[in-house]
C-alpha cells in the first residue's frame, strides 16, 4: 500500500523545508551575534563576531525565568479549564434537552465572530470594578471564555459521528447523564480533546493583548518580548533571545503531541462498517 | 421473569403517529418476535419497552407494574443492539460487567458473574480483549453477555443478527434459541427477516404501519393468515396472488381455469397459492400455463419464476429433478385445499371449501 515516494517529491519537499528553516537559523544566529554584526546581516558567518552577550543581558535585565513561569501558569490553567469544560458543554448541548438549548448554542458559537479587541474595554472596566486587575484570573477567564466558541463547536461536531447506541446502551446499563459523560463519552473523546488542548495552549501562549492590558507585576513572556524592543534601540539580539525562549515551549508541545493532530476521529460501536 | 403488556399504546412524533392504539401481551418466558417491513414501528415499540422512547398514550406494564415513566434500569430490561453498541474503550470483561458495576456490586461479585456469563457464551478466552479486536460473531456474543449478566426480567433484541454474514446468522440463530431454552427468560425480538421470525419465535407479531396485522404461532401465521399482507410476508418465496373473478359460485382465473367458491361471493378476488403448493405437471382439472423467466437452483429444491398468460408473476417450487429452462412454458397445477381467497381489500375470505 505504501510505495516509495518519487525522487522529485523528496527534492521539492527538501527545498521547501530548507526555506522554512531559514528564519529559525536567522533568529538563533541573531541572538548569538554582536550588534555590529547583526547590522551587517546575520548570514555573513565568515566575518561576524559571535557572543553570548545578548543572552546574558536579557537574563540579567529582564525577569525571563519569572515570565516563563507566569506564561506557563496562565497557559496551563486556561488550557486545562478548556479541556475539562468544553467537552462537558458539547455533551450537554448534543445529548440533553433543555429550554432555549438552541439559542444558547448559537450565542456561544457566535462568539467566534467576536474579536478580542471588542471585549477588552468592557472587560477592563469589569476587572477594575471587582479588583481583578493584575491577577492571573483576569487573563485566564477570558482565555477560557473566548475558546468556547471554537472548542465547543469542534467537540460537538465530533459528537455528531458518535454512535447514539453507546449512549442508549449506557442508559440501559443504568448510567445517568453525568455517568454517561464521564464513563462512556469522555474516554472516547480523547483525540478531539487533545486537539482542543493543543490549539488552546498555543493560542494562550502566543497572545499578547490580554496579558499586556491586565497584568502589571507578573508579566507573561509575550509581554516581556514586547518590552525588550526599546523605544530608541530595536535590541534585535535581545529580542531574538526572548523569541527563542518563547517559541521553545510550543515547539516542544507540538513535537510531543503531533500524533494527536493526525489521530483518527471515529468511534465505532462495533458494527461492521 | 415477567410478562410485558401494552394496552392502547400510541407513539407520536409531533403530528406523525408511528404506533396507533396497540394492544399486545408478551407472555412470561415466551420468545416473541416482532416482524414487519421497515418503518412499521417495530423498533419504536421495542425502544418504548426499553425506556429509550417515551410512551405517548396508553399503558406499558412490565411484571404487572406500570412502567411508562420508569427509567430503563428500573424496568429490569436488557437490550442487544443491532450494531452491538460495545464500549470501545473497555475490555470485554468490563463491557459485560459495566451494568453491575454501575449498580454498585462489589468487584468480586462482578467478576464472578462476568465469568459465569462468559462461560455460558463460551467467550472466556476473549475477556481481556477490546471490542475492536473481535470478529462480528464474537462481538455479538459479548453484546448478549452484557444482557444476560444482569439477569433481566425481559430481554430485548433489536435486529441483532442483521450485521452478521449469512452463515454466522444461521448459527447464532440456533444459539439464541438454545439460550432461550436454557435461561427461559421473556424475550422480545425485532427483525425484518421472516426466516428469523419463523425459526425463533413461540409467537410472531406481524406489524404494518404502526398496527398489529396478526399475532400467532409461526404455524398459525403460515397456515392461516388473516390477510394478504401476512400471507405475503410470512413464507419465502412469497405467496403467489393470482387475480380472479368470482361469479355464481365459480372463480374464474386466467387461461380458463375455474375453481369452486361460495355462491355469495362476487367481484374481483385474489387467489393465494404458496410456491410450494404449486406443482409443475399437468393432467389435473386446473393446470395453468406458466412461461418461465428464471430458475433458481438451491440443491435440494429449485424455484421457477415465471409469468401467467396475463403477465401476473408466479413462483413455483419444483422438488423433483425436472429439466426446465428459462423461456419454456410449462403446466402448473395445485390442490384446491391449498388455495386461500382474499377480497379486494386484502382480507381473507374463509369458507368451508377453502380452509386448510
Image (tube, rainbow, N blue to C red):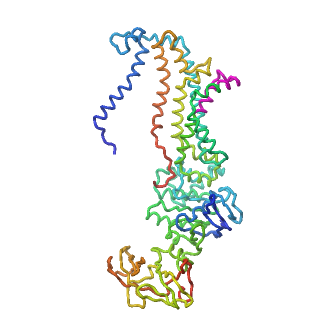
Residue A125 shown in magenta: yes
Q: Nearer the viewer, residue A269 or B279?
A: B279
Report the predominant secondary structure element of the magenta stretch: helix
Indicate whether B64 appears above or below B219.
above
x 63%, y 58%: residue: B14
Indicate whether B135 appears above or below B285.
above
A203 on left or right of B294: right
Work out which residue is located at the far left of the displayed protein and give it.
A7
Q: Does residue B181 appear in this view?
A: no
Q: Does residue A205 appear in this view?
A: yes
A48 on left or right of B228: left
Q: Provide residue B241's location: percent of width, then percent of height.
A: 47, 78
Residue A175 shown in magenta: no
x 55%, y 91%: residue: B263
Segment tinted magenta in the rendering: A124-146
Q: Provide residue A158's location: percent of width, then percent of height.
A: 52, 44
x 51%, y 33%: residue: A199
Q: Quadrant of the N terminus of chain B?
A: bottom right
Q: Provide residue A60's location: percent of width, then percent of height.
A: 53, 11
Asked which quadrant contains residue B291, the reply is bottom left
Numbered marks: total = 0
Asked which quadrant contains residue B221, the reply is bottom right
Indicate whether A205 appears above or below B269.
above
Q: Provide residue A234's location: percent of width, then percent of height.
A: 47, 12
Amino acid at each position: 500500500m505504501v510505495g516509495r515516494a518519487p525522487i522529485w517529491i523528496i527534492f521539492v519537499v527538501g527545498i521547501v523545508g530548507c526555506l522554512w528553516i531559514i528564519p529559525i537559523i536567522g533568529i538563533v544566529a541573531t541572538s548569538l551575534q554582536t550588534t555590529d554584526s547583526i547590522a551587517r546581516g546575520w548570514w555573513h558567518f565568515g566575518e561576524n563576531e559571535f557572543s553570548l552577550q545578548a543572552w546574558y543581558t536579557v537574563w540579567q535585565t529582564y525577569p525571563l525565568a519569572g515570565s516563563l513561569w507566569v506564561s506557563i501558569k496562565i497557559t496551563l490553567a486556561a488550557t486545562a479549564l478548556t479541556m475539562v469544560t468544553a467537552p462537558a458543554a458539547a455533551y450537554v448541548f448534543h445529548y440533553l434537552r433543555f429550554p432555549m438549548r438552541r439559542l444558547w448554542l448559537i450565542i456561544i458559537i457566535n462568539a467566534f465572530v467576536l474579536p478580542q479587541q471588542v471585549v477588552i474595554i468592557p472587560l477592563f472596566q469589569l476587572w477594575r470594578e471587582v479588583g481583578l486587575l493584575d491577577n492571573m484570573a483576569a487573563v485566564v477567564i477570558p482565555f477560557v471564555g473566548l475558546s468556547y466558541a471554537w472548542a465547543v463547536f469542534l467537540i460537538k461536531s465530533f459528537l455528531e459521528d458518535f454512535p447514539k447506541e453507546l449512549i442508549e446502551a449506557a442508559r440501559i446499563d443504568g448510567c445517568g447523564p453525568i455517568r454517561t459523560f464521564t464513563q462512556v463519552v469522555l474516554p472516547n473523546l480523547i483525540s478531539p480533546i487533545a486537539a482542543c488542548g493543543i490549539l488552546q495552549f498555543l493560542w494562550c501562549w502566543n497572545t499578547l493583548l490580554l496579558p499586556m492590558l491586565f497584568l502589571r507585576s507578573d508579566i507573561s513572556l509575550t509581554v516581556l518580548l514586547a518590552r525588550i524592543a526599546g523605544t530608541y534601540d530595536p535590541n534585535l539580539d535581545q529580542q531574538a533571545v526572548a523569541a527563542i525562549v518563547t517559541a521553545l515551549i510550543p515547539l516542544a508541545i507540538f513535537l510531543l503531541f503531533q500524533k494527536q493532530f493526525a489521530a483518527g476521529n471515529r468511534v465505532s460501536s462495533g458494527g461492521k462498517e | 421473569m415477567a410478562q410485558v403488556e401494552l394496552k392502547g399504546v400510541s407513539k407520536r412524533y409531533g403530528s406523525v403517529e408511528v404506533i396507533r392504539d396497540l394492544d399486545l401481551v408478551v407472555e412470561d418466558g415466551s420468545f416473541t418476535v416482532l416482524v414487519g417491513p421497515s418503518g412499521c414501528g417495530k423498533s419504536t415499540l421495542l425502544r418504548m419497552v426499553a425506556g429509550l422512547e417515551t410512551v405517548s398514550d396508553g399503558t406499558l406494564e412490565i411484571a404487572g407494574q406500570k412502567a411508562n415513566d420508569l427509567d430503563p434500569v428500573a424496568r429490569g430490561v436488557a437490550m442487544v443492539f443491532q450494531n452491538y453498541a460495545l464500549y470501545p474503550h473497555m475490555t470485554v470483561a468490563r463491557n459485560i460487567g459495566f451494568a453491575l458495576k454501575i449498580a454498585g456490586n462489589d468487584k468480586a461479585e462482578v467478576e464472578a458473574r462476568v465469568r459465569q456469563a462468559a462461560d455460558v457464551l463460551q467467550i472466556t478466552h476473549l475477556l481481556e480483549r477490546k471490542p475492536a479486536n473481535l470478529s462480528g460473531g464474537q462481538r455479538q456474543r459479548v453484546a448478549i453477555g452484557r444482557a444476560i449478566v444482569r439477569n433481566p426480567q425481559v430481554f430485548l433484541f433489536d435486529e441483532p443478527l442483521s450485521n452478521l454474514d449469512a452463515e454466522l446468522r444461521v448459527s447464532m440463530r440456533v444459539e439464541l434459541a438454545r439460550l432461550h431454552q436454557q435461561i427461559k427468560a421473556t424475550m422480545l425480538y425485532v427483525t425484518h427477516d421472516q426466516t428469523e421470525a419463523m425459526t425463533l419465535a413461540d409467537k410472531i407479531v406481524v406489524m404494518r404501519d404502526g398496527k398489529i396485522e396478526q399475532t400467532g404461532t409461526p404455524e398459525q401465521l403460515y397456515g392461516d393468515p388473516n390477510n394478504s399482507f401476512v400471507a405475503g410476508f410470512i413464507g419465502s418465496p412469497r405467496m403467489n396472488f393470482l387475480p380472479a373473478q368470482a361469479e355464481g359460485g365459480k372463480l374464474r382465473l386466467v387461461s380458463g381455469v375455474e375453481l369452486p367458491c361460495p355462491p355469495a361471493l362476487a367481484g374481483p378476488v385474489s387467489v393465494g397459492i404458496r410456491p410450494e403448493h404449486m406443482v409443475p405437471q399437468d393432467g389435473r382439472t386446473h393446470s395453468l400455463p406458466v412461461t418461465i423467466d428464471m430458475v433458481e437452483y438451491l440443491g435440494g429444491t429449485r424455484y421457477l419464476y415465471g409469468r401467467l398468460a396475463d403477465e401476473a408473476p408466479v413462483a413455483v417450487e419444483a422438488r423433483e429433478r425436472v429439466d426446465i429452462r428459462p423461456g419454456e412454458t410449462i403446466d402448473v397445477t395445485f390442490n384446491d385445499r391449498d388455495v386461500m381467497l382474499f377480497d379486494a381489500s386484502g382480507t381473507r375470505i374463509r369458507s368451508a371449501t377453502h380452509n386448510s
